[in-house]
Image: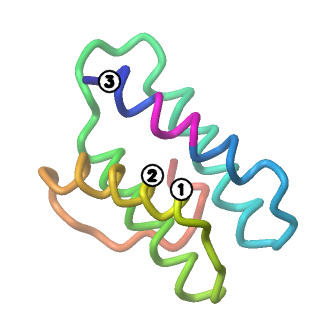
């Protein structure tokens, strides 16, 4: 299951690699840190995935960022994985 989450995170980071807006840089940083934390884990860290999905959603709306259809799908998949954990608002990438 952790492999699935890391795959989604990696794919989302790759699709955001060419985006220049400041919010995308923050999201890429959070994705990188989260993927690093998940490396070597056999079980998914649901609270981490939940915080990441909430942070990405918050950043997209607060900075009014536009996503492609593929990016929207990847964020939705990440949200579905994190839905099992408690929801909390994350507004700072340093929380990863």
Sooner in the amino-acid sequence: mark 1 or mark 3 = 3
Magenta region includes residue 8: yes
In this orientation, which residue lies closer to the viewer: 52 or 12?
12
3D distance between C-alphas at marks 1 and 2? 6 Å
Which mark, by number, is residue 44?
Answer: none
Give the magenta part as a residue range.
7-11
Residue 42: image quadrant is: top left
Residue 74: image tag:
2
Neighbourhood count class around disc 3 (C-alpha, 10 Å): few under 14, some 14–19, many 20 upward: some
Q: Residue 80 in the image: x percent, y percent?
A: 23, 54
Left/right placement of residue 43 relative to residue 32 reads: left
Position of residue 22 relative to residue 25, above or below, is below
> In the rendered view, does 25 fall on the left or right side of 52?
right
Q: Earlier in the sequence, mark 3 or mark 2?
A: 3
Q: How many marks?
A: 3
CA separation in Å, label 1 and label 3? 21 Å
Q: Which residue is mark 3?
A: 2
Residue with the most extreme front position:
69
Q: Split into 4 quadrants, where in the image is the N terminus?
A: top left
Residue 90, position as x, y percentages in the image: 43, 69
The local crowd at label 2, few if under 14, some if 14 to 19, many if 20 or more residues have their Cα within 10 Å, is: many
Secondary structure at badge 1 equals: helix
User: Circles 1 and 2: CB distance less than 8 Å?
Assistant: yes
Main SS category, magenta section: helix
Q: Is residue 1 above or below residue 87?
A: above
Q: Which residue is mark 1?
A: 70
**Which mark's residue is nearer the viewer, 1 or 3?**
1
Asked if disc 3 and disc 2 are in contact, CB closer than 8 Å, the reply is no
């Amino acid at each position: 299951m952790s492999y699935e989450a890391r795959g989604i995170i990696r794919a989302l980071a790759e699709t955001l690699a060419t985006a220049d807006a400041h919010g995308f840089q923050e999201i890429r940083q959070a994705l990188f840190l989260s993927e690093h934390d998940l490396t070597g884990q056999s079980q998914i860290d649901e609270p981490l995935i939940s915080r990441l999905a909430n942070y990405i959603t918050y950043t997209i709306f607060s900075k009014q960022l536009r996503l492609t259809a593929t990016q929207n799908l990847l964020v939705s998949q990440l949200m579905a994985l994190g839905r099992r954990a408690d929801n909390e608002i994350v507004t700072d990438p340093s929380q990863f």
